[in-house]
Image (spheres, rainbow, N blue to C red):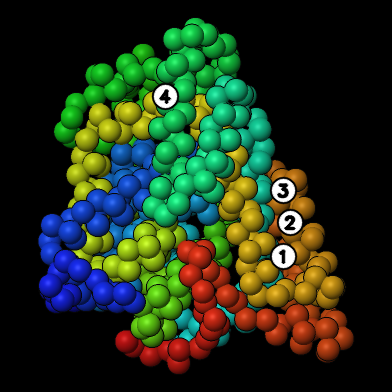
Amino acid sequence: MALGWKLHGDGQHLAPGEVVRPDERLTWGRTVGLGAQHVVAMFGATFVFPLIMGLNPQLAVMMSGIATICFLLIVNGRVPSYLGTSASFVGGVAAIYAQKGTAPQVTGAILVAGVVLALVGVVIHFAGSRVIYKVLPPVVTGAVVMLIGFNLAPVVANIYWPQDQWVALLVMVAVIGMSVGFRGFMGRIAIFLGLVFGYVLSWLFDRFFGQITSFDPGAGKITTHWRVNWDSVASASWLGFPPHTGDIGPGGKALVGWHLPEFKWTFVLLVLPAVIALIAENTGHVKAVAEMTGADLDPVMGRAIAADGIGTVIASSVGGSPTTTYAENIGVMAATRVYSTAAYFVAAGVAIIFGLSPKFGALVSATPGGVLGGITVVLYGMIGLLGAKIWKENDVDFGNPVNLVPVAAGIIIAIGNTSLSFTKNFDLAGIALGTIVTVLGWHLARWVAPKHLGDAAAGATIVYDPAGAFVEEDPYRDSGGGKS
């Protein structure tokens, strides 16, 4: 891709109905401002999810910038998008830790999932998207997204919420209020604002109510401690690379940072269902951008999905978190009508700079547990309900037993974390087992059902619009494959 952008008009003004296309830009001053705005939009989720997955947020933010640059280059600058931390892997990662897995084993499993996603993107690029659609119709895709989110309910209930229930409750209420009460850009960064609110609230609670006695993840047991502890922030330097996993921080606590991945195939199976969610997510994001810009992006659909997989591989190869395209940033584009990829290169550069500040990483890592409790109860529920959104937008008919029965079984297996043991050392449980039951069960049900029921179940077309833009066409419409 030639790294050059045409100046749109005078570079300062947009007439009513005008948009700045991906190959155009405003003046560099305005472009830098827009790039910084994109960083703020992706900020909250991009460093909250690494915290939840037990990975280093400083490294995650830095690698998100690198992954975004790779994405833009792979799609030849035709798809403006930012690759932030993916939420789709959180459930699988929680299951890995529940089975005594380590951070290197987590990133090893994520890396394999990234390879699979990249290969799926290659298949879509050359064979056309219908080959994937036939395997993953909207009823299945929606179910997998839903079970990934709702499987995480015990994580909130048993880990984050009990650390400080009143802070968690107030943060939850604040996030709900800000997300629907604020308009435009402020509403889109409600998670980030909720984190700031929770930090301040926790500090005030320390001043007025003193220390809290609850589970302390750092100590691994119930202790009496301050909600806000900035010892690690004070000792961290302003500039430098993220720490190495195993380095000892303040108080003798082992740190999680950069590391090489380790591979355990049992754990790989726990995160592979996230690939299904990412296929739907990336497809919906690309189609949303296509609708808003008026461009035909079907020929680069496969490239975009493959680029996301490659971004995940690059990030996880050094211990970073998985990546995905971000609806938050698409929302910013919809509000500003500026789709210039130049702004995304700026955003990526700003993220890399943040990632080179250990003090920033320590500040994020010191987020009080109660704050995460209030944020995750909203985020995890939103992940699950995105599955219902896919069903609704595609008019999935649950009066048809082909859709109803296998999906019902798969979701309950995932939410209940039901397990199926094969040997003493290998079993399938939760998200992995629920996904297998949903996918294979749906195809089995369609095969044995009367023809009219099977054909009706397979007749829907996927429309997935997380950014709120109106998508009228089928995002999985066959693009004919071939190189773009």
Q: Residue at x 42, y 18 (%)?
A: 203
Q: Residue at x 66, y 49 (%)?
A: 150
Which amino acid lies under the numbered mark 1 shown in the image of this protein? Thr
First of labels 4, 3 by sequence position: 4
Mark 1 surroundings within 10 Å by alpha-carbon count, few (fewer than 14), some (14 through 19), many (20 or more): many
Marks 2 and 1: CB-CB under 8 Å?
Answer: yes
Is residue 107 depicted above or below 256 in this figure?
below
**Which label was assigned to residue 415?**
3
Residue bearing the label numbered 4: 200
The secondary element bearing badge 4 is classed as helix
Q: Mark 2 against mark 1, which lies toward the viewer?
A: 2
Mark 2 surroundings within 10 Å by alpha-carbon count, few (fewer than 14), some (14 through 19), many (20 or more): many
Marks 3 and 2: CB-CB under 8 Å?
Answer: yes
Spot occupied by residue 366 in the image (x, y as percentages of width and height) = 39, 26
First of labels 3, 1 by sequence position: 3
Marks 1 and 4: CB-CB under 8 Å?
Answer: no
Residue 401: in sight, yes or no? yes
Mark 4 surroundings within 10 Å by alpha-carbon count, few (fewer than 14), some (14 through 19), many (20 or more): some
Q: Quadrant of residue 260?
A: top left
Q: Quadrant of the N terminus?
A: bottom left
Give the spatial CA distance, label 2 vs label 4.
Answer: 38 Å
Give the spatial CA distance, label 2 vs label 1.
Answer: 8 Å
